Image (cartoon, rainbow, N blue to C red):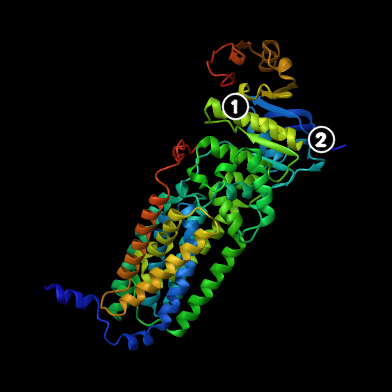
């Protein structure tokens, strides 16, 4: 295969204007997803929940695959799957440590179910592949509306619980001593996380949800420790990754996800570099305190 | 005249058949420093939970600043033991302290001039102004513990509840934090209830000791409570209090322990 042929497979920007017209719904959906992913990601990182995100996305995939097989709305299917997963993980433990093995048990089961449903499904194979690796096939109006409704619910819920949730994520015992209802906030956040994952599965696919719900926030905390700036940066990074990735993917036959994940990863690398330049190691006389998790 | 910062009347706590303590009468006056000592399992942590409103008494009453306790009450400042914070915690030192003021309130965290003023004041009081804008997760354990004291006093509480705040600090930092707590109670008039397994770092500041052991307790000045006779009577077995180089060591008669106040009796 010559280099020229390979390049043209990846990028072909003739007819770009016409394509853009076809996918403006996808771009709106991507922007919504970036907003939600960036905000939720702040807590995914603060609560050390990337593994839960991965687990929920596999069960969301199983739900979407079941919906495809049964001929019902895929959004509803992925919502049911991820909310079910979030509730299960939520009741199984308050902190990451407690439910990691539960997630490890449920995740492959969900993935297996999803693969089974897809194997039984007789429809277009592009639909099948899309659930795992993302798709750019036009987001239709009803789907965009449902995504917008979910996004509104997630953003509203986060706006209400933001401050006590941040406190509880940082030090649950201290927050409880100050009167924060820690035991209520934990399942509430898992539910919000479930909604966000169900949205993401539609666009980037189940395997790559982490690129939107973890990477942007993980990048943001590398360059700032301001609780006001971190969410803003995280959203900006997530929107850049998903909208930028979509625009790049337009001119190619490759699914959207490699573009989104590459942009996302590039931002993360850049932030690590910036963080290292701005904070050469730790402050003098300030050893990393991470080892002292006394309970 | 201000009501006692903490008032316990006939207070008792039991788990099923197991009685931790009972008949506890205690008035902690504003500005008073009371150390709570005792063997593991004697009910120190449970007492804290009662004061925090996280656990009801089995008997008796409890009031903080003249009011019945309730979960998350504003009259209490809380200083927990040092726990490491992730280096990527998305908070600066000043934001961490601010959580003690309004971290429990619903809604988004937004910049607030009023909160800034209160936070700046306590940061100066604990000598943390120079790292006020540093990421809190990258500060040392001693620096983080200063911030926890600031977090405890930022709401101007009537009672500062300290739960083993010196644990995992080296001697130098333990003394510095003890001094800090002492100064804060003088400046603000808050009473201090200081749960600790080692009285030595706070000994110069302690007005009274509440010693819990074997279902009973003793309250009084350190010179009265921290004696071989009193503690032997309390434990019902020979206990020796040794003074060595200005430090008090409590040694259980049956099993001598080189560590002060640890596993004295079970």
Q: Which residue is drawn at 28% across and 78% down?
A: A125
Q: Name the residue under label 2.
A: B4
Element carrying mark 2: loop
Image coordinates for residue A120, horizontal then vertical, percent: 30, 74
Q: Can residue B2 be seen?
A: yes
Quadrant in which the C terminus of chain B is drawn: top right
Q: Residue at x 37, y 86 (%)?
A: A22
Mark 2 vs mark 1, foreground winner is 1
Front-most of residues A233 and B225? A233
Image coordinates for residue B26, horizontal then vertical, percent: 78, 29
Return the chain for callout 2.
Answer: B
Residue B42: which numbered mark, if any? none
Q: Is residue A188 above or below residue B149?
A: below
Front-most of residues B159 and A233? A233
Single out the residue that lies furthest toward the left. Answer: A1
CA gap between label 2 and label 1 equals: 27 Å
Q: Which of marks 2 and 1 is nearer the N terminus?
A: 2
Q: Can residue A87 be seen?
A: no
Determine contact: label 2, label 1, CB under 8 Å. no
Q: In this view, does A193 lie above or below B204?
A: below
Q: Is residue B92 above or below residue B174?
A: below
Q: Mark 1 points at which residue?
A: B175
Image coordinates for residue B61, horizontal then vertical, percent: 79, 37
Quadrant in which the N terminus of chain B is drawn: top right
């Amino acid at each position: 295969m010559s280099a020229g042929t390979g390049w043209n497979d990846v990028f072909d920007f003739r007819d770009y204007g016409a394509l853009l017209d076809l996918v403006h719904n996808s771009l709106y959906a991507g922007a919504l997803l970036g907003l939600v992913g960036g905000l939720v990601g702040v807590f995914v990182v603060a609560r050390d929940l990337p593994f839960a995100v991965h687990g929920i996305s596999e069960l969301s995939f199983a739900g979407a695959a079941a919906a495809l097989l049964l001929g019902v709305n895929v959004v509803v299917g992925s919502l049911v799957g991820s909310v079910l997963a979030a509730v299960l993980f939520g009741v199984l433990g308050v902190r990451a440590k407690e439910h990691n093995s539960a997630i490890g048990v449920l995740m492959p089961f969900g993935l297996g179910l999803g693969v089974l449903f897809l194997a039984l499904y007789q429809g277009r194979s592009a639909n099948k592949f899309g659930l795992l690796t993302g798709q750019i096939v036009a987001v239709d109006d009803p789907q965009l509306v449902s995504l917008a409704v979910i996004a509104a619910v997630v953003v509203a819920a986060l706006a209400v619980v933001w401050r006590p949730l941040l406190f509880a994520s940082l030090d649950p015992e201290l927050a409880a001593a100050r009167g924060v209802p820690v035991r209520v906030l934990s399942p509430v956040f898992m539910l919000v996380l479930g909604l966000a994952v169900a949205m993401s599965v539609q666009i980037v696919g189940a395997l790559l949800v982490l690129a939107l719900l973890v990477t942007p926030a993980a990048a943001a905390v590398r360059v700032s420790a301001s609780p006001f700036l971190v969410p803003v940066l995280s959203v900006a990074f997530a929107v850049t990754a998903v909208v930028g990735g979509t625009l790049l993917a337009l001119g190619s036959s490759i699914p959207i996800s490699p573009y989104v994940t590459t942009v996302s990863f590039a931002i993360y690398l850049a932030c690590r570099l910036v963080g290292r330049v701005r904070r050469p190691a730790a402050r003098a006389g300030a050893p990393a305190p991470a080892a002292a998790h006394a309970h | 005249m201000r009501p006692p910062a903490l008032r316990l009347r006939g207070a008792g706590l039991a788990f099923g058949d197991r009685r931790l303590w009972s008949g506890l009468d205690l008035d902690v006056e504003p500005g008073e420093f009371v150390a709570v000592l005792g063997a593991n399992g004697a009910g120190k942590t449970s007492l804290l939970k009662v004061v925090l409103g996280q656990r009801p008494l089995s008997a008796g009453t409890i009031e903080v600043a003249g009011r019945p306790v309730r979960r998350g009450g504003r009259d209490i400042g809380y200083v927990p033991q040092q726990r490491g914070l992730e280096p990527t915690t998305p908070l600066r030192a000043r934001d961490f302290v601010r959580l003690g003021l309004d971290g429990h309130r619903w809604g988004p965290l937004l910049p607030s001039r009023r909160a800034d003023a209160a936070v700046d004041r306590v940061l100066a009081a604990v000598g943390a102004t120079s790292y006020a804008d540093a990421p809190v997760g990258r500060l040392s354990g001693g620096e983080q513990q200063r911030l926890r004291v600031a977090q405890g006093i930022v709401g101007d509480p009537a009672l500062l509840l300290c739960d083993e705040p010196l644990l995992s600090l080296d001697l130098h930092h333990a003394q510095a934090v003890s001094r800090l707590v002492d100064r804060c109670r003088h400046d603000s008039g808050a009473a201090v209830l200081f749960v600790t397994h080692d009285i030595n770092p706070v000994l110069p500041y302690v007005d009274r000791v509440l010693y819990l052991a074997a279902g009973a307790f003793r309250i009084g000045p350190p010179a009265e409570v921290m004696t071989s006779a009193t503690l032997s009577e309390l434990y019902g077995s020979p206990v020796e209090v040794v003074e060595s180089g200005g430090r008090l060591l409590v040694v259980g008669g049956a099993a001598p322990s080189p560590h002060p106040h640890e596993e004295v009796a079970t």
